[in-house]
Structures are given as structure tokens and as C-alpha cells.
Image: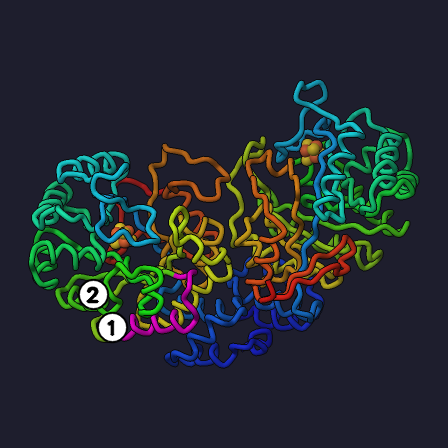
Amino acid sequence: MYSALARSDIADIVEKVQAHERLSFEDGVRLFESNDITAIGCAADMVRRRLNGNKTYYIVNRHINHTDVCKNRCKFCAYSRSEGEDGAYMMSVAEVVARAEELYQDLKFTELHIVGGLHPTLPFEYYTEMLSALRARFPEVHLQAFTAVEIAHIAEIGALSVEECMRRLKEAGLGSLPGGGAEVFAPEVRNRICPEKMAGDDWLSVMRAAHNLGLRSNATMLYGHVENAEDRADHLLRLRNLQDETGGFMSFIPLRFHADNTNLAHLARPRSGIDDLKSVAVSRLMLDNFPHVKVFWIMFGLKLAQVALSFGADDFDGTVVEEKITHRAGAETPEGLTVADIRRLIEETGTAPVERDTLYREVTHEEQAVG
Amino acid sequence: MKLYGTLDSAAQGARLSREQAVELLSCHSLPELGRAAAAVCDILHPEPVRTYVVDRNINYTNICISGCRFCAFYREPGNPDGYVLSTEEVLEKVGEAVELGATQILMQGGLHPELGIEFYEGLFRAIKNAYPVHIHSLSAPEVVHIAEVSGLDLETTLCRLHDAGLGSLPGGGAEILVDRVRNELSPVKCSARKWLGVMETAGKIGMRATATMVFGHIESHEDRVEHLMAIRDLQDRTGVFTAFIPWTYQPGNTALGRAAAGGHDYLRTLAISRLVLDNVSNIQASWVTQGDALAQVALRFGANDIGSTMIEENVVAAAGVRFRLSEKRLIELIHSAGFDAAQRDTMYRLLRVHEKGVG
Ligand code: SF4
Ligand code: SF4
């Protein structure tokens, strides 16, 4: 170890990482409490390179939110509406397909990401029909849809067990589950920020069932509110334990608490770039059995998201726009990036951009050149 | 990794050679570079305190004959949008700033074809008569221009401005101190030798200055290192520089266009600046160009100062970057980086310390 690193207050943890040793709960707490972000980054970058070499992944995907109507109305959620409220909407299956069609004309995506609120009256068949209609129209596109929270709700609507519910959704075309709704598992924290939402253990159970059915998924952590270092380390260890059991998680995505325009706005900690990097780096270190850590550039901003690629993240996400729609140069967070922009940002970090599909297989384009 | 040796000796304070610096610029192991720079920063600033300054930027004129290709701020003489602030307008702005706790006034403007030294002497005297504020103003190209317009040599020009109240020179206009690059970017602006000459003269008459570097445009890594070496050599001879401030070229609304350098390049270059400039005590982060989150990270990449509250920043704002941070936010950023925050003056003397976890 070189001398600047040896002087760090977490030098012993860096040594454990060098020796391929698994980190403990206490190590996780100390990492989250340390401000030595470059030392944490050295260790996280080492692990990232061990697992993903010189590759940085991105995906060409698009998002559809089929409804904002949600019976939960979590206090931190500025997105959801009650039925009949101003701004409430619900897309029919035909509308979802038409929207996908429109997006596909714009850009040939390989993944469609579909999440929405917990609609109180939509029937179970709505979800299976949506998936089969999309699969019929876009047989090549992977459908990543419905968080664990939505799955539990859809099962309830259909009076099915979550296993049976997911088995039917999978039959209809569901490819994998996104990682949303995990928030922070610790019950005291959950009670303060989202008492309306399913318990952490239930979230993990849905994921366990999904993995057992052969559905892969992602996982998230919502940080930057009332949680402390112990809560974060506990969250990561519960994910690591489940992953030891099932191996079904693909990537982990840290999400910063963002409660603007809600009455939990006062619980949001002021933004700290160092904490953002820590959320990536410490996760990379604790989740030694997760193949990937993803940084959402929309949330981090391009500059910090790019830096995160040297702090443990190996996936830059997607949401790219077509080349001909040029975004405003210099905007910190444009709404979409072109494939060429994403590749350039990745190359600037000294890593090689790799287009992936949802399951992290490399996508090769035969006729059309990328970038 | 073969760079460990270089990083190791740099982290212990050894002087880096030109070749070593170039080598480090192509090193992509960002956290390792950052760790070495942070180690050097901790040696130079062992107290866990990081600083900011409260100041106001006043752009007294936007009329400029230089026409730099990366500049979105200037207007050519005769352009109806051109302006020159009156002494009254400047005094009003200074008054507002002092009211808000400013200790420093940063006045910079275009190279106006008709404003001679008397204009500046009058302005500085008026400010000094009215307010107890430090005048940190006029970048080197402006000083060169004033000398030319007034038919004076540099030393006389600087002595007269200093007498009138000019306290120190901001480091703007350095861009990249390599004439091949300057000729392409800002052909009318003063040469590298002249920029360095102004700073050398300032040092000689007992003034202080900062130095900047604007990177991420057409320059090569060797050019960046050339720039750092020029600053280090001059500092060895004069000790004129209080601080070094690297930032990235901002492409919005400029003739040069191109993509902006990313956060990766910014932090890497900042860290290398800390490692190479072993004789400059302070390195400033630039939240104006990098955003607050990245500027905070910079405090762990070798920077010991987060810059100023910048009550006004027209040059950058004209290029499409509009950040405005309150003193409270700067303190918060320093605290959440794990340091006590202190307001400083232009000479980096601590004025008020805000301890972490105490409000
Ligand atoms: S369950 Fe999801 S969509 Fe519904 S209110 Fe909560 S966060 Fe919003
Ligand atoms: S950067 Fe300065 S010298 Fe160059 S055009 Fe702009 S105002 Fe004039």
C-alpha cells in the first residue's frame, strides 16, 4: 500500500479489501462515517476493477410510467396522485403500447422500464395484458417492470400469492424487476419516511421469490434523510445475505432522498457530493457479491456521475436520446444524453464503454454504427 | 502500479519533474491521485479548517477589443449592449457587498480602448475613501492594456494603481501559459511572457496575486504541465502567488464551442496542481464552474479553499452557468466534507471560524 493510503483512518479496511476479505457490519459503519473519500474510493475502484475490469456499461432504454395513481401516497413521493385528483392519469394498455411505439420510432431501445403507482382499481389482467401486448409488438425488447412494492399490490389485486402473481407476469412477458421501493430496511427509519410502504422484510421476500422463479432484479437504497451509518450498513448487509442465498441481484443503485414539494422536504439532508460518492463506493465495498453498481447520472449530475465511475460504479445507466435531438451544451443535467455523449464521458475516465442489455450481455450492432 | 513511486514521493512533499507531472495527467486512477493530493494538502494545512471568502465580483465594463474565442461576456466597442459602470454605480455595488460582509472586491472588465490609468486610480481612491475593503482587481491582461493605453511601463502602472488602493491581482487571463495555445484562443490577449511579467513585477513591488489555469479546450497535457511549471518557477523567484485556481473552460455561448471537460478531468487536474505546485500554499476549488457537489469533493482532492460567495459573476453567467451560493451553503459544504469552516480575507488570514456540528 502506498504511504498516503497507509496513513488513512480506514487503512485497515483497505487492507482487508486488498486481501479479498469480506467486510463486516462495523467496517461498513466506519466507512460511512469516514470522510476519507479518496481512500474509500481507492478500495472501491480496486473492487470495481476486479469485478468489471476496464468496462463501463450503459444501456439504451426508455421509461414508461403507466399511472401516477397510488393508494399508498407515501409522504415523500411528489409523483403520486389519488384517483380523480388533478394531474392523476392512467394509461390504457393500448396507450402504453402506443407510447412505446412512439419512443421506439425515436430510438431503438433494448429495454423498456415500466413502473407506476399502486392503482386501487386496475385489475390483475391489466398488467398481464400490458406485458403480452408489449412483448408481441417488441419481441426483442426486455421488459423490466414493477417494483417489489407493485408486485405485492398486483398480487393482492389478483388474490394471488406473490409467487403465483410473478409466475403469471413472467409468462406474460416480464423479464426482470427494477430495484425500487427498498428505501432503508431499518423499521424505525421506514416508519419515519414511509410508514405506508411494505416492510423491509416483505420487500426482501418478494425479491427472494422472484429470484427463485428465475427473475433477476436490481436493488436500491434511499439515502440522505434520517438514516445513520448503522442503518445504511444494515441495509447493505441484508441485501448481501439475500444475494448469498439467491444470486439473483444484478445491480445496486443508490438513490438520494429527494422530497422537494412534499411535506417531508425537511427530512432531506443538504446535498453533499462526498456523501453521494460514499453511497456508491461503500456499497461497492460491502456488496462484494453484487456484480454491478449503477450511478444514475440524472440524479448525480453528469460531472459527479462521471467521477463515480472511479469510485466503484461500473454502470452509467441509459436514458439516451436520439443523436439528432441535440441537448443544450453545458447544461449540468440535460434530459437525455446521446450515445456519443455517454461513450465520451465514459472514455474520459479511462474505461471502455460497453453497451449492455438488461442482463448485462454486450450488445453488438451489425449494420448500424454506434456513436 | 508504476505510478505509485511518483505518487508516494509527491505525497511526502518531494518536487515533481515535468515528466512525472505529464505521466500523472494520463493516470486514470482518480482516487489514488486524490489521496496523494489530499495528503499534501493535509501537510500544508494540518488544522482541520477549510476556508471561503465573502466577496463581490464587479464587471466594470464589458467593452473589449480582445475578442477571446472562449469569452461569452464581451461586446466590441460600439456595440449597443456595451457598458461602463459609473463611479457611483460601482460605489453602490461595493456598499451593498460590504453590507453583506464582503471583505474583498473583485473588479474585472474588458480591455476598453479608451480607459486610461486615471480612470482606475480615481475609481480605487473613491472606493478606498468610502469603504474598508480589499481591492483584489484587474487581471494581468487588463494591467498590460492599461499600461499601453496610458503609455507607461508595467512597473510604473502597477505602482500607481497600488498607491491608489489596488491591493492584489486576481489570476485571470492566464488561461494556458503557452503561446501556441494562446494564439489560437485569444490572439489579442497578452502573451504568456507578459502575463508572467505582470505577476513578477507585482511581486517585486510587494503586491500579491493569485494564478489560474483554464483547461479542457485545445491544450494538450504537456501544455497544462508547461503552465504549472511556469507558475512554479515564478513562485520560486517571487513568492507572489497566494493561491492557484484551476477551472474548466465553459463552452456555452462562446465562439469556440466544444464539449465541456468532465468532473473526472477537473479533479485529476486539481489534484496534480496540488502535487506540482509545492510552493503555492493554497488551492481553490471552483464551485462557479463545477457546481457545489463537485467543489465539495475537491476539498478532499487537494483544495483547501472553496472560493467565494461571488455575489455577482457576469463572465461565467454569460456562458450559461448560473450558480449562486450563500455563505450558509458554503459553510455547510465544508462541514459535510468533515472540516471546520472559516471565513478568510484575501491574504488567507482566518476571520471567523464556524465549527462543525455547532450550528
Ligand atoms: S408506493 Fe411508490 S408511487 Fe406510491 S406513493 Fe409510495 S413512492 Fe409514490
Ligand atoms: S476574456 Fe477578457 S479579454 Fe478576453 S474577450 Fe473576454 S473580456 Fe475581453
Quarter containing the C terminus of chain B: bottom right
Tell me residue B55's x, y (percent): 71, 46
Q: Does any portion of residue B177 appear in the rendered image?
A: no
Tell me: is circle 1 under 8 Å from ligand 1: no
Q: How far apart are marks 2 and 1 (CA)?
A: 9 Å
- Along the line of sight, the residue nearer the viewer: A281 or B260: A281
Whether the magenta-drawn stretch holds residue A231 is answered as yes
Host chain of mark 2: A
Q: In which quarter of the image is residue B344?
A: bottom right
Query: Circle 1 — which element?
Result: helix
Disc 2 and disc 1 on one polypeptide chain: yes
A271 vs A211: above or below:
above
Residue at position x 80%, y 46% from top?
B133
Q: Residue, x 42% and y 81% (percent of image)? A: A19
In the picture of the structure, the residue carrying the numbered disc 2 is: A207
Q: Disc 1 sits on a residue from what chain?
A: A
Provide the residue span drawn in magenta: A223-241
Q: Which amino acid does label 1 sit on?
A: Leu
Residue A30 relative to residue A110: left or right:
right
A194 lies above or below A136? below
Dot 1, crowdedness within 10 Å: few (<14), some or many (≥20)? Answer: some
Q: Main secondary structure of the magenta part?
A: helix
View quadrant of ligand 2: top right
Q: Is mark 2 on a helix, strand or loop?
A: helix
Residue A191 magenta: no
Residue A294, compared with residue B255, is above or below; it is below
Residue A242's tag is: 1
Do the CB atoms of the residues marked 2 and 1 lie less than 8 Å apart? yes
Tell me which amino acid carries mark 2: Met
Towards the viewer: A289 or A197: A197
Q: Residue A279 carries which label?
A: none
